[in-house]
Image (tube, helix red, strand yellow):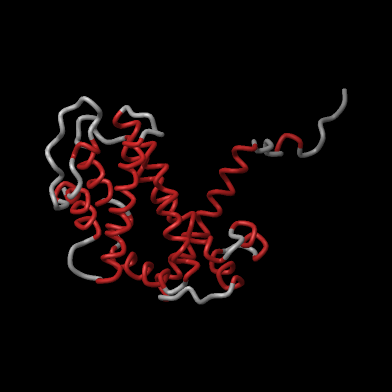
Amino acid sequence: MSRPQRGAETQPPARTAREVVEAKEQAMLAASRAVVELFVERGTNDFTIRELAAHAGVSERSFYRYFPRKEDVVRPFLTAGAARIATELTERPPGEPLQTSLAVIWAASWAATHVEQLRQLYRVLRTSEGFRAQWFQIMADSERLWADAIAARLGLDPRSHQAALAAAVVSAAARLSTVDYGEAGHGESPAELFATALAMVGPGLFTAPGSPPPAPVRESTDAGRA
């Protein structure tokens, strides 16, 4: 009888392709979050790649593999936030007016619950054309996530004009609430600004075809603070 090879029983199973991709995505998100926190803490994005990689706990080679351009480093953090909002929309009570659901979810988002960090991050990103363009591109890319979530909620085709337009409105409301608070740093909160923007749009856009329109969303975040 042949002897089993030494250590054969302790070798971990080979990871699947999906597990490899998920591990890379988690590593990229962790590095992105660490760099965003550094930008917020220092109030600047004026760091070398070597400094950013060291702060994120990865090698320069890995950093370049994850983020080919310096401004790419904020994408995983910001994209994860948009994806989380879209996912939470599908988990809201089905009978809740869609505009209310959106206002409640935004009120609990990182942008609405970390207002000082949001203001600092916005001011850091706007100082660089590359970072500013990246942020606006992420907002635009997030529309597809929101269109899919809105379509699922209303029973629409994700490619329908209604789903696309509703997603564009949500994206615009998110952008305006972030920019307005980032510029002012006081006054209405991002959550209040977002709810106010949604209230300017008729409820028909956020209602399933053939359903009676719900009551307009309130121009406050009482529901979000509950």
Residue at the spot 43% in from the left edge and 55% down from the top edge? 78
From the viewer's perspective, tell me whether residue 110 is left or right of residue 204: right
Task: Determine whether 43 is above or below 35 in the image.
Answer: below
> In x, y percent, where is residue 147?
37, 39
Task: Determine whether 109 is above or below 213 in the image.
Answer: below
From the viewer's perspective, tell me whether residue 1 is left or right of residue 31: right
Residue at the spot 18% in from the left edge and 42% down from the top edge? 202
Residue at the spot 58% in from the left edge and 46% down from the top edge? 23
Choose between 128 and 192: the one closer to the eye. Answer: 128
> In x, y percent, where is residue 212?
15, 29
Where's the N terminus, which quadrant? top right
> In x, y percent, where is residue 163?
34, 37
Q: For the view shown, which residue lies furthest in the right direction?
A: 1
Choose between 11 and 84: the one closer to the eye. Answer: 84
Task: Determine whether 187 is above or below 76 in the image.
Answer: below
Q: For the view shown, which residue lies furthest in the front direction?
A: 161
> In x, y percent, where is residue 151?
34, 33
Total marks shown come to 0
Choose between 6 and 223: the one closer to the eye. Answer: 223
From the viewer's perspective, tell me whether residue 176 is left or right of residue 160: left
Q: For the view shown, which residue lies furthest in the top direction?
A: 1
Residue at the spot 34% in from the left edge and 29% down from the top edge? 156
